[in-house]
Image (spheres, grey):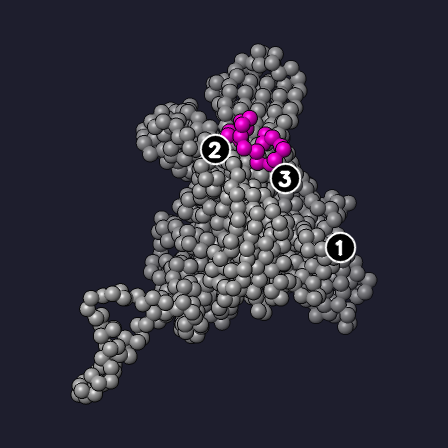
Amino acid sequence: MPSWPTNTKYISQSTPRVDAAAKLTGRARYSSDIQADGWLYGMILRSKWPAAKISGINLDKALQVPGIKAAITVRDGERTVHFYGEELAAVAGTTRQACLDALRAIEVKAQPLPFVVREDDAKKDNAPKVWEGAANASPGKSREQGTLDQAFTECAAVIEGFYTTPVQIHNPMETHGNTVSWTDDGVTAWSSTQGISSVRDGLAGALKLDHSQVRVITDFMGGGFGAKFGAGAEGVLAARLSREAKAPVRLMLTRFDQALAVGNRPSSFQKIKIGALADGTLHAFEMDNYGTAGIGAGGDSGGGGGGADIPAPYIYKVPNIRVKQTHVAVNAGSARAFRAPGNPPASYGMESAMDDLAVKLGMDPLELRLKNDPNEIRQREYKTGAEKFGWKQKYQKPGSSPGIVKTGIGCAGAAWPAGGASKSTQGEAQINPDGSIEFRLGVQDIGTGTKTVIAVVAAEMLGLKTEQITVKVGDTNFPPGPGSGGSTTCASISPTVFDICTKALQQLQTQAGIADARGENWFAACKKLGVSPLVVHGQWQPGLSADHACGVQFAEVTVDTETGLVTVKKVVAVHDCGLIVDKLTTESQVNGGIIMGLGYALYEERVMDDLSGVVLNPNFETYKLPGLADVPEIEIVLINMPERGVIGIGEPATVATAGAIANAVANAIGVRVSSLPITPAKVLAALGKVPPSTASKS
Amino acid sequence: MKSPEPENFGAHSRRTFLKTLGTAAVTAAAARAQSVAAELEKVNAEKTLGPGAVPVTLKVNGETLKLMLEPRVTLLDALRNYSSLTGAKESCDRAACGACTVMMDNTPIYACQKLAIEAQGREITTVEGLAKNGKLTKVQQAFWDKDALQCGYCTPGFVMSVTALLKKNPRPTAEEVKHACAGNLCRCGTHPHILQAVFQATGVNTASKTEVMDYA
């Protein structure tokens, strides 16, 4: 079995990302920056009806707009649209303004249909059907173990709660989109994607081309968080417009489009009943959960998909359980994978119930976790984090913080059971006689630092400096790599680069006759290659990576009981990801996970209007993201476990935050706000100062 | 296209009055001919622009850009799509995210909220105009060192906001940095590192508090 080197110069140290200068000077070209020769703007006309029969779309007037080179419908003939924002037609033109004019000139004949956008409404028997001939609510899946009803009678404490989480929108800063050029030689797509291979395959399938006729390039991309894997309607439309207009088409979604049609995290409505024995041992757990994945049918989301089911009782083992889950279709854009699918809502619901149970038991909630968490690594993380955070010194009984602005603390645990690696990952390196070396992997860097990881591992293995390593990714012409999802990228590419380097050193030994070509011998060895560069192919190898990362987070908040405003003051996060490859970018991942979790806890929610069926907040003024002033002091402890090999960190880092913050709020004010996001209105309602809002129940 | 002035205005407007003066009036008032001609020229310069493309001259990063743009084209659109300056990013296109932040006469502005024709005669600086001869500015270098960027799409906007702040206030407090960046959003959650980077750029040492512990 291969193993990672010890006494490292780069691995587990802090290496600033290798492509930062390009991003900091504006030199980096994202998909939205591509200016292919003669390129046209592309734009999409979307349904303004949440449900309608479309009997005709007339493009004639759009085609007459000066500058318009192509106008197409998504499909011919009659069709039904199922959500506000569904794609109807698309145009390509020489200016943005021409396209805007053309969209307004398209005539759509539509007969509006009844619709439903709220989960509770959609569950009713007489609700309009999202899909003809199918009930909105799935029959539901049940799972039972032990003797639940009897078990509850054996408990010393039982609590019941109804914990809800909203639909969250990915909102990457770069919207979805592509620049696509369709020529006789095939299709080239500069895609803002997390999966160049899946986009290639998707485009080829939709356009009836061979895979080899489609090339996807992603030099830089502005964030995805799970929503950017497929070619998407927008990718296919861009390609069709390019064919029609005989010119490259850049079709990037607007911020509005982004909120409607390209994914979201499903909602959850978790009715939880949980009981423990007198010593705090969890004994009985019952959950009835429903949520919506929009028009998507939903399904299990325990590890990767975009469905509405969540893992329960999450990270805990309870001997007697009954779990029932239902997904409810509504007339809204379909869910997609979203950073740790299923896990943040599961953590929020379960960890809230744990704290409520601790109150009933009269136990310190941290003690209740230590009593019941079966995972040894997390046990260690709780103890480490508690000390760093000062849990013992800070903990007060719920609601006992004095004054108008109250302080509270909370904690929660995370797991990422998916993870692991894509075992089919390949890559190559070209070593030139002058000693320069270029790595080529068909993976993409979505902002996590993938290029930097390649450079770090290569520099370590070859005894070179990271500046000497040229890294090329984001091109389907390179050996195939994984999609950037499931926190698998780092664990996929690190062993692959390890393998390439091992083989390169072996071949240099054979060809150059130098026993160890690393470090100071590098240039001499390469020179002996003569005139032909050495190209070395490698692939993922077992023994260098693992899965199942864990983490725990502690949060301290203040709650203004007059305004209801929650401020997160501090977060201590303790995470493990096996062998840390680059400390600096790992730290960035954890920061990012916490801040996204903070948004989920306090601000983010897609709001649907049940009268019109539209998304009311498809923009950044009303869909609030955390800003610099909202970000607390964050302290991170990384538990380094080189013996496990490399594990991804992107997803586990965002799981526990909302639960920890929610528990801190409950600890501060002595009552539970059992619905995310924890807005001032909900805090005041929980305190009995204002009536509960009926509008924010979903 | 409609004139911006009311058509049925009881008295002549200054513009129509001058226009209808005609040659006779000019001849008759020979002594004042020159000043009338000058007035006419001035008035003609006020003519309605558009809807078609008009010549627009922008001064960006010290260089002159001569473009033909419809008057409704924003500065952001002009930079990104009528020249090759794609550093300023489009993310919301409605003054809510700051990815398009550029400096206009050293003041940070949202380029998506400024028409290109309005930006004429002003000094525009984009992220491409900061590094001179390939040498990063202190702010850029600090962002790199502290990993104050992830996907990088919001980064040019933050760099411009911070650069503009430090021009006016070389030693800002954390609160002042937060205020200066209040108009910039980042979805990757790079904020703590941005704060560290700003302090490094001002010469304040900010060591990472992150601790690495061995499990074994």
A223 w.r.t. B102: above or below? above
Q: Nearer the viewer, mark 3 or mark 1?
A: 3
Residue for point 47% across, 70% down: B132
Residue to which mark 2 is pinned = A698
A231 w.r.t. A269: above or below? below
Disc assigned to residue A305? 3
Chain to which the residue tagged by mark 3 belongs: A
Residue A9, picture quadrant: bottom right
Residue to which mark 1 is pinned = A538
**Side of B185 where A73 appears, left or right:** right
Which class describes the residues within 10 Å of circle 2: few (<14), some (14-19), or many (20+)?
many
Chain to which the residue tagged by mark 1 belongs: A
Q: In this rendering, does residue A111 appear at all?
A: yes
Q: Amino acid at mark 3?
A: Gly
Q: What kind of element bears circle 3?
A: loop
B95 w.r.t. A70: above or below? above
Q: Position of residue A144 (x, y in %)?
A: 65, 21
Q: Which residues are magenta?
A: A120-137
Q: Nearer the viewer, mark 1 or mark 2?
A: 2
Chain to which the residue tagged by mark 2 belongs: A
Q: Are marks 3 and 1 on the same chain?
A: yes
Q: CA distance from mark 1 to mark 2?
A: 49 Å
Q: Nearer the viewer, residue B110 or A490?
A: B110
Q: Amino acid at mark 1?
A: Gly
